Amino acid sequence: MNSQELMAIEDQYGARNYRPLDVVVDRGEGVWLYDTEGRRYLDCLSAYSAVNQGHCHPRIVKVMREQAGRLTLTSRAFRNSQLGLFEQDLCELGGYEMALPMNTGSEAVETALKAARRWGYQVKGVPADQAEIIACVGNFHGRTISIISMSSEVKYTQGFGPLTPGFRLVPFGDAEALEACITDNTVAFLVEPIQGEGGVIIPPDGYLRAAAALCERYHILFMVDEIQTGLGRAGHLFAHQAEGVRPDVVMVGKALSGGLYPVSAVLADRPVLGLFGPGDHGSTFGGNPLAAAVAREALRVLVDERLSDRSMEMGSYFLGRLARLESSLVREVRGRGLMIGVELQDHAGGGRRYCEALAGRGLLCKETRGNVIRLTPPLVITRNEIDWAVEQVAAVLEA
Ligand SMILES: *Cc1c(COP(=O)(O)O)cnc(C)c1O
C-alpha cells in the first residue's frame, strides 16, 4: 500500500490525538528513515530522544531477537534471569543504590511521585495526605491524570478534570521562587534539567546547584526527570551532571531501550526506593526479561560508542553552524549536546510550515511550543550529515 492509502486508513480508524507530518515511515537505519515509497529522510527528532543510539541498532536488535525467542514475560510474580543484571548495570552506570523498572516515561514519573509522597510521610513526617510536590511552569512529565495535574499547559489539562491535588508550580530557572514556595509539607522538587517539550529551555548556570542546595537545606527530595535529556542527549550521561549535582531521584526512559521497546526506571538510594514494600507498587510488564535484556545492551552501546562525548562534540559543531544562519526568521539558536532548539520570531508564523518544508527536503523534525524547531538527531550522526542538515535548514529559513 502507498502512503496516501495508509494515511487514509489511519485517519479513519485512529484517534486523532496527534497531528503527524504526512510521512509514512517504513524502515529505519541509524540516522536515516525511509518511507513507503523508498524516499530517504534524516531523522532530526529521534522519537523525542528515544532513539539516541540510532534506528535499529544492530547490536540491540540482535539481543532483542535472541531474548524474544527465549523468554519475554514472567510478571514479577516470579523472578527472571535478566532483571537483576539490568538493575545492577543501571545502578552502576547511574551511580545509585537501587532501581525500579517500569515501561513508559510517565510511569517512571508516577513512580517517583509515589516514592516522594511515601518518603514525605514515613521519613519527613508530613501529616497524612498533606504532601506537596513542587514542579516548574512549562514542564513536561507525561500525560497521566496526575502528571497533567502539574502541567501549566491549558491544552494538556482542559476538559480532563478533576485534577490531582498536591502540586505547586514555580517559574523554571528561578531558585528564589523555589525557596519561596517551600513549606513544611513540601516533599519534593521535580525538574527537567533542560525543558524539552517546553521549547529546549536551558536554565541559568547554577540553577540546578542552587535547587539541590535548597532541597538539602529544607529536607526535600531533589527529583530530576532525565527521560528526554538523559542517556547522552545533552552531552552527558545525565544532563544534570553539567552542574555536578547528584539528585535524590532520577527518572530515565526513552533511550533506555534505544527505541526498541518501552523501558523506563527510577533511580535512587535505599532511603527512598527502599520504602516500597511488596504490593506497594507494580506493573505487569515492568522489569520483564525482554525489556531488561534490550536495555542492558542499549546501555552498553551508549558506553562502548561513547555517545555522550559524541553528543557534546557533534552538538557543538551543529550549534556553531546553526548560529551562523542568516535568517530574519530566527530569534535564537540554543542547545547543549545534540539537544538543539531554533526559536523563530513571531512573524515567522509558527514552526509547523518550516517542518513541513524540511520534510519535503528529506529532513524530519517537529516544532514544539509552536515556534521552536527542535533538532535532536540520533547521537551517531556524522559531521557530513550535520553539514547536509544545516544546508536544508538554511534553504528553508534563509529563503
Ligand atoms: C517523553 C517524556 C516523558 C514521558 O514519557 P512517555 O514514555 O511518553 O510516557 C516524561 N518526561 C519527559 C521529560 C519526557 O520528555
Image (cartoon, helix red, strand yellow):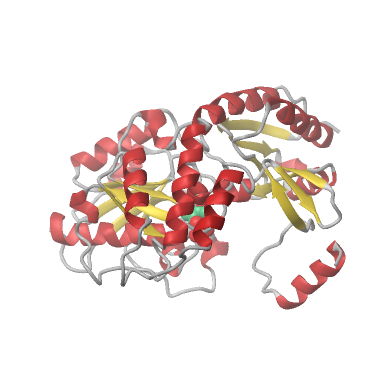
Toward which corner of the image does residue 246 lie, by quadrant?
top left
- As rendered, which of 229 and 168 lies closer to the eye? 229
Answer left or right for 123 relative to 144. left
Quarter the C terminus occupies = top right
Percent across and percent down for residue 144 are: 46, 67
Q: How many marks?
A: 0
- On the question of residue 140 being in view, the answer is no
Toward which corner of the image does residue 113 lie, by quadrant?
bottom left
Percent across and percent down for residue 105 are: 46, 57
Q: Is residue 363 above or below residue 150?
A: above
**Residue drawn at the location 19% of the way across and 44% of the way down:** 218
- As rendered, which of 173 and 67 lies closer to the eye? 67
Toward which corner of the image does residue 59 lie, by quadrant?
top right
- As rendered, which of 295 and 359 lies closer to the eye? 295
Quarter the N terminus occupies = bottom right
- As rendered, which of 110 and 47 lies closer to the eye? 47
- On the question of residue 222 being in view, the answer is yes
Percent across and percent down for residue 37 are: 86, 55
Q: Is residue 92 above or below residue 270?
A: above
**Residue drawn at the location 76% of the way across and 35% of the way down:** 329
| View extreme (bottom): residue | 13
Percent across and percent down for residue 337 are: 55, 31
**Residue drawn at the location 59% of the way across and 36% of the way down:** 379
